[in-house]
């Protein structure tokens, strides 16, 4: 199994340990750009792979949950996107709970897809879906929502796997700007 770490945003301490592909930047200041860099790296450097798992570097996903998502994708096959979904009943910062609740409702109304955690960074992405994702325009947090919307038109089934809900220090390490990034995310629905 091959693994590569991305550093988004660059202030994370993960970057010094991250393997680097020649000529490919692994320091990206925007979430979607970093994910696209990593997905492109997977396609170019590991073309025989079956599973790509993305996980935020903020300490939220537990290592066991990352493996759980990888196993679920391996079992489900190429036509599935696996989301590691958190529970939002307790100990969740207000902005995270509110943003996810609002986006869930809009997603259901606009696309008909019922997803319980639209903002999870823990995702198992089928290798065959990567070319469609690399063609998406968004490069910020809106990329992750566009990925969910694109599943429908690409024939990809979204499957959810429950994971631990972890927010370190009230999620203070998050670089999500509630006003700017929310506007970009909701613009995806307006297209």
Image: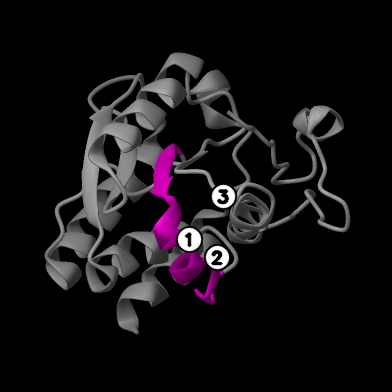
Q: Position of residue 77 (x, y in %)?
A: 28, 44
Q: Quadrant of the N terminus?
A: top right
Q: Quadrant of residue 30?
A: bottom right
Check disc 3: other Cα within 10 Å, few if <14, some if 14-19, many if 20+.
some
Q: Which mark is residue 176?
A: 3
Residue located at (11% from left, 65% from top)? 112
Residue on which disc 2 sits: 180
Q: Are marks 1 and 3 in contact (CB under 8 Å)?
A: no
Q: Position of residue 152 (x, y in %)?
A: 23, 67
Q: Residues in magenta? A: 122-138
Disc nearer the start of the sequence (1/2): 1
SS type, badge 3 = loop
In this view, the residue in front, 73 or 107, is 73
Residue lying farthest to the top in this orientation: 64
Colour convention of the picture: one colour
SS type, badge 2 = helix
In this view, the residue in front, 90 or 135, is 135
Q: Is residue 50 left or right of residue 18?
A: left
In this view, the residue in front, 93 or 12, is 12
Residues at marks 1 and 2, CA–CA distance in whole angstroms: 27 Å
Residue on which disc 1 sits: 130
Q: Is residue 16 left or right of residue 115?
A: right
Q: Nearer the viewer, mark 1 or mark 3?
A: 1
Q: Is residue 12 magenta?
A: no
Q: Quadrant of the C terminus?
A: bottom left
Q: Position of residue 111 (x, y in %)?
A: 18, 69
Residue located at (78% from left, 49% from top)? 26
Residues at marks 2 and 3, CA–CA distance in whole angstroms: 8 Å
Residues at marks 1 and 3, CA–CA distance in whole angstroms: 24 Å
Residue located at (54% from left, 30% from top)? 171
Relative to 19, is 21 above or below? below
């Amino acid at each position: 199994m091959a693994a590569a770490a991305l550093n988004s945003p660059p202030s994370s301490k993960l970057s010094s340990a991250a393997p680097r592909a020649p000529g490919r930047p692994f320091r990206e200041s925007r979430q979607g750009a970093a994910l696209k860099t990593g997905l492109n790296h997977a396609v170019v450097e590991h073309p025989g792979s079956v599973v790509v798992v993305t996980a935020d570097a903020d300490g939220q996903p537990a290592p066991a949950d990352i493996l759980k998502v990888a196993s679920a994708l391996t079992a489900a096959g190429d036509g599935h996107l696996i989301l590691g979904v958190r529970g939002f009943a307790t100990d969740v910062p207000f902005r995270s709970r509110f943003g996810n609740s609002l986006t869930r409702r809009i997603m259901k109304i606009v696309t008909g897809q019922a997803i319980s955690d639209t903002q999870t960074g823990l995702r198992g992405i089928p290798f065959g879906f990567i070319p469609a994702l690399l063609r998406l325009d968004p490069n910020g947090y809106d990329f992750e929502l566009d990925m969910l919307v694109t599943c429908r038109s690409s024939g990809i089934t979204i499957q959810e796997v429950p994971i631990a809900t972890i927010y370190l220090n009230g999620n203070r390490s998050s670089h999500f700007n509630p006003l700017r990034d929310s506007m970009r995310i909701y613009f995806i629905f307006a297209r």
